Amino acid sequence: MQQERLFRLAVEAMHLQCTFEGSSGWRLNVAYRRQDESWPDAYRVCYSHLSSTELADALGEELTRALGL
């Protein structure tokens, strides 16, 4: 009998990509997976049309969420 995990494993790999698109502003792509996950099961999110301040805020929030800070 296999017991359910009592806690989430740590983030093992993360991909962050910030791209500036001339007339649209910044785009942020975030993907990360935990030790027991494969990339198809990984958390993914994409933000677009961000100002520089919004990019910094979104990046900070995603890192906080991923690392449990």
Image: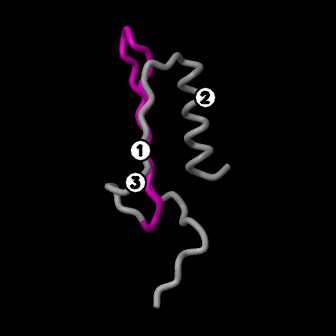
For mark 2, give the secondary structure: helix
Q: Which residue type does callout 2 highlight?
A: Asp
The number of numbered discs placed on residues in the rendered structure image is 3
Looking at this view, is 42 or 56 the one in front?
A: 42
Q: Position of residue 20 (x, y in %)?
A: 40, 19
Instruction: Choose mark 1 or mark 2, whichever is in front.
Output: 1
- Alpha-carbon span between mark 3 and mark 1: 6 Å
Contact, CB < 8 Å: mark 3 with mark 2?
no
| Label 1: element kind | strand
Residue in the image at 44% along x and 68% along y:
36
Which residue position holds label 3?
A: 42
Is 25 left, or right, of 64 in this rendering? left
Q: Which residues are magenta?
A: 12-36
For disc 2, the marked residue is 57
Callout 3–callout 1 Cβ contact below 8 Å = yes
Give the distance between the C-alpha atoms of the residues marked 3 and 2, in whole angstroms: 22 Å
Front-lying residue, 24 or 52: 24
What element does badge 3 sit on? loop
Question: In the picture shown, does residue 60 fall above or below 23?
Answer: below
Write down the residue under mark 1: 44
Residue 9 circle label: none
Image location (x, y in percent) of residue 58 = 56, 31
What's the residue at 52%, 83% (across, down)?
Answer: 3
| Distance between the alpha carbons at the discs numbered 1 and 2 | 17 Å
Image location of residue 24, percent across then percent down: 39, 13
> In the image, is residue 34 part of the stretch drawn in magenta?
yes
